[in-house]
Image: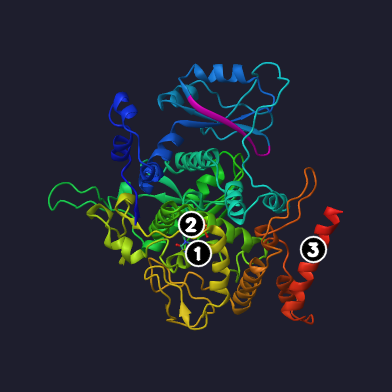
Amino acid sequence: AKSFPKTEACFQRKFGTNAAAAQAEVPRKEEIEEKAAPKPFIDVQAERQEQAERSVLISCQSKTNEKKFLKLLSKHGDIKKYFYYESYGTYAVVEFANKESIASLLEATAIPSVNHESTVPFKSRLLSLRGSGPAEQSRLQCEPQTTIPINELIQRLSREESVDRQVTSLTEAYQLTEENVHLRFLVCSLVKDIAAAYFPECIIRPFGSSVNGFGKLGCDLDMFLDLDGISGRNIKVPKTGLSLEYQMKRASSERAVTQSILSVIGECVDQFGPGCVGVQKILNARCPLVRFAHQPSGFQCDLTANNRVAMKSTELLYLYGALDQRVRCMVFTVRCWARAHGITSSIPGAWITNFSLTVMVLFFLQRRSPPIIPTLDHLQELAGPGDKSVIEGNDCTFVSDFSKIQLHNNTETLEQLLREFFEFYGSFAFTKMSINIRKGKEQNKPEVAPLHIQNPFEPSLNVSKNVNGTQLERFVALCQESSWLLQQSDISTPRGGSEGQTPVPWGLATLLLPSQVAVIKGRKKRKREPASERIKSLLESLKNKNQQKKS
Ligand code: CTP
Ligand code: MG
């Protein structure tokens, strides 16, 4: 079994406590391979949030004189980190070493007067740089905030020399960058400054794919308005003494309170929020939310409140993703494959969602022999007293300390796992069985629905309730096709390809090409050729392309 050592202990064991000992002690091979335990989710969140509060977002010109720009800012304190990016203009994210620098900087800024228009006098940390001297010859070096287009990805993957490399290369191309995560926390922190007008102690926390380890560049930014610090939800009220409560406003339900809070905050974001455009209040949804675009960052934002279960499921996904690097690789690959074939969509409807797909990948990894990741029930058994969490009557407790988790020694390659994944779901008993990551075993379906995936923290709910029969059928057919393709030797061997030429798709790249199944199932009335014919023609076309390249 593999386990994570605690960071400090591991460091001391490997390198000793002083330089001489470090030289004398040569670490054993197993020790080098042993990775330090990842940080618990809440620690990562707290660090990022604190970093965001020391940061500002500045609109500048692409040919800004960088030296002068940094000198101007340094007047207010030491700069710890900065980077530039483009989104309808050029922006800089600047992180100061101390929070005091922000106050000093804001003090020195003025609210601009605009001809024929008036501005709402709201001083935010979204600034713009004026008159920083003559433009430079060279442009600022910008960090990418979006993924490469799918065609470019297919070409990149076709140049790799193994399916394993293809899968990791896809993950590297799609995952959020350090800078993008910094920007996400900064946008939450800017929205917090607006909400703080009503609730000074509130926190706006990102959740979902921005922080669960499975986010793709360009994914939406899910935010959660956390008022627990004010409401003192987890604090025992003393029997005697002064109570803060005095003729407080009440509503008929917690839902009604959430709706009224989101309604005013939504209004405030709309009227006073710099850079916030297209604000929509969607208060009658199962989970009420305010949707808007944050123009300077380019993020589509969904602001919710009182959504603590979603925060827990985000933490669970983070934990699973950090346990074994194959988990994130598999999730990124399956999500990308699903998007390429229109199994998932950016429009809400009867499609399978990214969240459902992720749970399906986790379930598959629990079903390997030996399992790659533990069941949720097991993670609950390992929980310590500080991990206890009950939300609206549901027990959401599970371990947060990675060093308590022992993993089995499963050595399957990504290529094997990918093939097995498609085989697994290509022949899964969807009609009878429900997918359950709490037990790590399929269960009898408790209700009729084409696809049943038990919500890990609200067992009575089906995560994929929206999915209809047609969409499930398409998913199964595509799994079967992909599993078949990966078993063909001409498809699963690298094609090589000369420098400067478009490489011939092979392996994972082939799976991302438009499928025949998708076309035929999409237009039901068309006559169907037998599956073997369709795949034969696909193979033929690939061979032809290969020959063309060689000649
Ligand atoms: N969530 C949930 N139950 C659902 C749907 C969502 O608990 N039925 C939670 C999950 O924690 C999910 C988060 O809400 O991660 C955000 O949902 P969504 O934006 O739909 O999914 P993401 O995981 O953020 O993926 P995407 O990249 O598609 O936005
Ligand atoms: Mg999301």
Residue 345, visible in the rendered structure: no
Along the line of sight, the residue nearer the viewer: 199 or 103? 103
**Total numbered labels:** 3
Task: Give the quadrant of the C terminus.
Answer: bottom right
Mark 2 is on which residue type?
Val
Q: Which residue is mark 1?
A: 361
Residue designated by label 2: 327
Marks 1/3: CA–CA distance: 32 Å
State the residue at coordinates (61%, 39%). 296
User: CA separation, marks 1 and 2?
Assistant: 8 Å
Q: Amino acid at mark 3?
A: Lys
Residue 228: where, in percent of width, then height?
Answer: 33, 50
Residue 298 appears in view: yes
Secondary structure of the residue carrying numbered label 1: helix
In the rendering, which numbered label is found on residue 543?
Answer: 3
Residue 321 in which image quadrant: bottom left
Query: In front here: 87 or 22?
Result: 22
Q: Which residues are magenta?
A: 80-88
Residue 67 place in picture, x, y as percent = 60, 17
Residue 168 at x, y percent in the picture: 57, 51
